[in-house]
Image: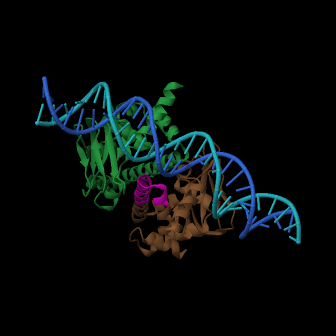
Chain colours: A brown, B green, C blue, D cyan
Amino acid sequence: MQMLRNYFKGFGDISSENMDFLLSHCTSLEVPKGTELIKPNQDVDAVYFLEEGFLHYYTYSDFGERVTLKVVEANYCWTMMDSFVNHVPSSDYCVALSSVRLCELKRENYQAIKSKNKELSNFIQSIVEQILSAKVIEANKKSRMTIEQRYLDLLENHTKMVQEVPVQILASLIGTSRETLHRIRRKLAAA
Amino acid sequence: MQMLRNYFKGFGDISSENMDFLLSHCTSLEVPKGTELIKPNQDVDAVYFLEEGFLHYYTYSDFGERVTLKVVEANYCWTMMDSFVNHVPSSDYCVALSSVRLCELKRENYQAIKSKNKELSNFIQSIVEQILSAKVIEANKKSRMTIEQRYLDLLENHTKMVQEVPVQILASLIGTSRETLHRIRRKLAAA
DNA sequence: AAAAAGCTGTGTCATTTGACACACTAACAA
DNA sequence: TTGTTAGTGTGTCAAATGACACAGCTTTTT
């Protein structure tokens, strides 16, 4: 839970009572590799914070091809946004790529935190705003970069992910085929 | 301002006093085609709601190529998220593609609304959550679709945009060159 | 009105990509 | 232990794409 505490701290100051209140509404859990955290038609009623391991968030295109939407890594907060916010069933998948340790914040606890007091509701508001900002930055960055640049970015900023996540999944994440990613790796190795 | 009122209504119920308070903190403005709303190094301290026309939000890649990040259309709320949330100067551009009518909500007014009362702060929180959800859905949708599907999506759901925005900009928006988009259009016309 | 700038349509051609195929290795389950 | 499944490296080839080039058209500027 220490990791989650530090994650929260990064969003601003908060009294220690409120921090404890926050953390007391989160529960730790561990799941083995291969666990299907989320399947289509499921109602996602929690937000997850990853402490260790990798999650594979993916869906299928109209052509039946599996498309990676996100590889969730440690120290990252994630949920099926649409399902969580709008109470609709998810249409995508989320599977543990490794043994995973995570914290769960249930929707009812999320609501309880928001209505506890002003500091907490402002704190949560600030977190959501910052996550929104980060999402936009991430999407814009992706738009500007070529496939090769995206791979170099992974290498630089998500080294462990590159080492531990299957190449096919990385390829799909950056928007190409595993063969093309392989060509990029070969080229980089030669240089 | 009526359009903005309806936009807000779409996010949930709110007392008419609060709605009026909200709207009284927004100001209407009109800018002619070609206006540079935002230039690099500028500090963006407002959120904009478009009532009419189109905005071109773009940046440049490492290769000096102009990349369209978003074409903002009527009934859409937009800002340079990073700059607005984190008080950092923007590095991108936003230019009016046509004569544009918009509403502006300054950061200080945004704060004033959030702290006015509980209903308003919850209302704003709910809007931010829903916008975040929509952003994620949009990004995921884009990941799943081919260039052609993205164009068909524009045709179907943003007909006016396809008619009024230069093809080069649309091509960049969906992630391809104007030549390739042209090939797609030719193919669709033949069918 | 003339000139300039921006946008569009289109052809050619070299390059990049994806699809397929196959061998090899690692991980896992019976 | 053995069979099975998942993942990787690599080659070939057809198809898709981007870069370039140029002509015609529209809009804006002088």
Judge whether residue A69 can be spotted in this image.
no
Residue at x 35%, y 32% (from the top left corner): B164
Residue B187 image offset from top left, x and y in percent? 51, 30
Quadrant hosting residue B165: top left
Q: Total of numbered circles in the picture?
A: 0
Residue at x 52%, y 45% (from the top left corner): B141
Closer to the camera, A130 or B191? B191
Q: Name the magenta segment's main secondary structure.
A: helix
- C19 left or right of A147 in image: right
Whether residue A139 is in magenta: the answer is yes
In the image, is residue A191 above or below residue B152? below
Judge whether residue A87 can be spotted in this image.
yes
Residue at x 47%, y 69% (from the top left corner): A156
- C29 left or right of A42 in image: right
Residue B150 image offset from top left, x and y in percent? 49, 39
Closer to the camera, D16 or B191? D16
Quadrant hosting residue C4: top left
In the image, is residue B56 above or below residue A169? above
If the image is split into quadrants, where does the N terminus of chain A sit? bottom right
Residue C18 image offset from top left, x and y in percent? 59, 47
Closer to the camera, A165 or B123? A165
Closer to the camera, B147 or B6? B147
Whether residue A191 is in magenta: the answer is no
Residue B123 image offset from top left, x and y in percent? 40, 49
The magenta stretch is A129-150
